[in-house]
């Protein structure tokens, strides 16, 4: 079953995660998650990270083999997984900026990354981000470390951002990879028994629906539900007794070609996609519209990070969700493996690493309008005592499903024009830098039931490799000094994102 095969690819993509995640430097208060959800409400994007804890078969070897398959098979949709594509070149190729980046002398040592303290849920503090006005920062959760700032943008600024995005033109955020599907499936060098072992989370020799659903984050670009899985089983006669559970023998008896035919005859509607929205990118660097520059400077003062980090991060992403729009729960940053490199620093890193991922230290999300119905940002496991990936799916309730189960998430942030929410996507490493991805940052955009929802995202990019981040900043500074206007950060950033269709 190719959906299961895609699921296995998703499992393998997260195969080499650490056994334990370093705890944050703060202790979460004990409070009622339901209470935290009351009266609250999205962020956006990246490839949705697969849900897999390390197991014997979830090894780096499987990661490498199956990520090649994922690249060929899913293409654009990998923005919802790792935003992966090949980035290494031949040693004999033109050296370009990768070779120049080595330069004379070592890269400078970077200062520790700043990180706001949450104190406790509901804690409020004042900060001056613009002249003659104080902004209120309110702590919404400690896991992830999440804050809200009412009135971060003025109504006029919100309207201008929407207008600039409309002038530039928006494109669909997710494109179904319909071509070369069967050919890509044929290139996957893994047996059906191995696929079964990858999916069999509890190793009981049987595949329950929730075990399959836990890994079908991608499928063929659509969001799989229990009903979808059972309909597929029935169509390809994979589950003769109709109990929704596949034995090892039943799984081995399946013919993947039958699934190819099934998927070709069932085209996904927009409502069935992992993400249903349109987006564009707006440049914020030197020479940008003065409002865009002012917002970037405001974010700089908010995050208290170095100007080099903020200025060299991604442009502003503007997203429109029409009625029926949604984005199922995901995290904004990819996992950190030896086989991956950050999308922003790969431009200067002289490393032969096969896969790239978005490295987003922080997400700053702006609500650009008031939504008539729905459209909240849900954090399904915010401030849970523990995090268990398999517990996200219980019976017929999938907490990642933002079309049907947003009301069951721990925390929902309601869209209010001008309000900003921001959070950290990584835990600290204990040495003032980026640690592991914070699983509690799982979030999604709830279904827009009425009207249109506009948001914008500022992602702050930081490479978990301190040396690579320093080298990147050093090289971009050199380009700015030596190349004049044509070599400003826009060369690497705005143009790089101009044709981007999907993201984490």
Image (cartoon, rainbow, N blue to C red):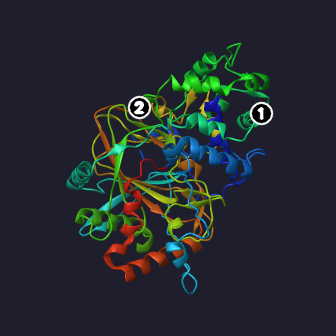
Q: Nearer the viewer, residue 20 or 77?
A: 77
Q: Position of residue 283 (x, y in %)?
A: 32, 61
Q: Position of residue 303 (x, y in %)?
A: 42, 65
Q: Residues within 10 Å of mark 1 (few under 14, many from 20)?
A: few
Determine whether, in the image, residue 282 is placed left or right of residue 263: left
Outermost residue to the left:
156
Determine whether, in the image, residue 241 is placed left or right of residue 272: right
Q: Is residue 497 above or below residue 229?
A: below
Q: Position of residue 347 (x, y in %)?
A: 50, 67
- Whether residue 251 is visible: yes
- Which comes sooner in the sequence, label 1 or label 2? 1
Q: Is residue 420 above or below residue 398?
A: below
- Whether residue 386 is visible: no
Outermost residue to the top:
241
SS for dot 2: helix
For the residues labelled 1 and 2, say whether their Cβ atoms are less than 8 Å apart: no
SS for dot 1: helix
User: Which residue in the protein does label 2 denote?
Assistant: 270
Q: How many marks?
A: 2
User: Which residue in the protein does label 1 denote?
Assistant: 193
Q: Nearer the viewer, residue 9 or 437?
A: 9
Q: CA distance from mark 1 to mark 2?
A: 33 Å
Q: Position of residue 278 (x, y in %)?
A: 35, 42
Q: Is residue 487 above or below residue 503?
A: below
Outermost residue to the front:
92
Question: Which quadrant does the N terminus fall into?
Answer: top right
Name the residue located 57 percent from the left edge and 87 percent from the top edge: 105
Q: Residues within 10 Å of mark 2 (few under 14, many from 20)?
A: some
Q: Nearer the viewer, residue 227 or 350?
A: 350
What is the quadrant of residue 112 in the picture? bottom right
Q: Is residue 226 above or below residue 91?
A: above
Name the residue located 45 percent from the left edge and 62 percent from the top edge: 460
């Amino acid at each position: 079953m190719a959906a299961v095969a895609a699921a296995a690819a998703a499992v393998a993509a997260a195969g080499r995660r650490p056994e334990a995640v370093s705890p944050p430097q703060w202790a979460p208060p004990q409070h009622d998650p339901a209470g935290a959800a009351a009266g609250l409400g999205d962020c956006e994007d990246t490839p949705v990270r697969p849900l897999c804890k390390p197991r014997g078969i979830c090894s780096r070897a499987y990661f490498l083999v199956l990520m090649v398959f994922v690249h060929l098979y899913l293409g654009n949709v990998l923005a919802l997984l790792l935003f992966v594509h090949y980035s290494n070149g031949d040693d004999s190729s033109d050296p370009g900026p990768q070779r120049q980046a080595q330069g004379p002398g070592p890269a400078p040592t970077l200062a520790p990354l700043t990180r706001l303290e949450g104190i406790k849920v509901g804690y409020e503090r004042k900060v001056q981000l613009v002249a003659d006005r104080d902004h209120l920062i309110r702590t919404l959760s400690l896991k992830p470390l999440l804050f809200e700032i009412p009135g971060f943008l003025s109504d006029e600024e919100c309207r201008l951002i929407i207008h600039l995005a409309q002038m530039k033109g928006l494109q669909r955020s997710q494109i179904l990879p319909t071509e070369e599907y069967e050919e890509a499936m044929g290139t996957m060098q893994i047996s059906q028994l191995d696929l079964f072992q990858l999916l069999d989370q509890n190793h009981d020799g049987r595949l329950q629906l929730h075990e399959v659903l836990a890994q079908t984050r991608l499928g063929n670009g659509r969001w799989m539900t229990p009903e979808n899985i059972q309909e597929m089983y029935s169509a390809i006669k994979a589950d003769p007794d109709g109990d929704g559970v596949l034995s090892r023998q039943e799984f081995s008896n399946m013919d993947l070609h039958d699934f190819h035919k099934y998927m070709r005859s069932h085209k996904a509607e927009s409502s069935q996609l992992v993400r249903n929205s349109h987006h564009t990118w707006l440049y914020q660097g030197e020479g940008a519209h003065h409002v865009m520059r002012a917002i970037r400077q405001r974010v700089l003062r908010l995050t208290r990070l170095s100007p080099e980090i903020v200025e060299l991060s991604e442009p502003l992403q503007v997203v429109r969700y029409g009625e029926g729009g949604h984005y199922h729960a995901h995290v904004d940053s990819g996992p950190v493996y030896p086989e991956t490199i950050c999308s922003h620093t790969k431009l200067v890193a002289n490393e032969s690493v096969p896969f790239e991922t978005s490295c987003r230290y922080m997400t700053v999300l702006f609500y650009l309008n008031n939504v008539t119905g729905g459209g909240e940002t849900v954090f399904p496991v915010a401030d849970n005592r523990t995090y268990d990936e398999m517990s996200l799916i219980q019976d017929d309730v999938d907490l990642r499903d933002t079309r049907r189960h947003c009301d069951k998430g721990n925390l929902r942030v309601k869209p209010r024009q001008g309000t900003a929410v921001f959070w950290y996507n990584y835990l600290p490493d204990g040495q003032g830098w980026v640690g592991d991805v914070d699983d509690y940052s799982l979030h999604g955009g709830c279904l827009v039931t009425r009207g249109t929802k506009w948001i914008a995202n500022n992602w702050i990019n930081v490479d978990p490799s301190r040396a690579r981040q320093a080298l990147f900043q050093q090289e971009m500074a050199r380009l700015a000094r030596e190349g004049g206007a044509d070599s400003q950060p826009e060369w690497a950033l705005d143009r790089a994102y101009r044709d981007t269709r999907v993201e984490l």
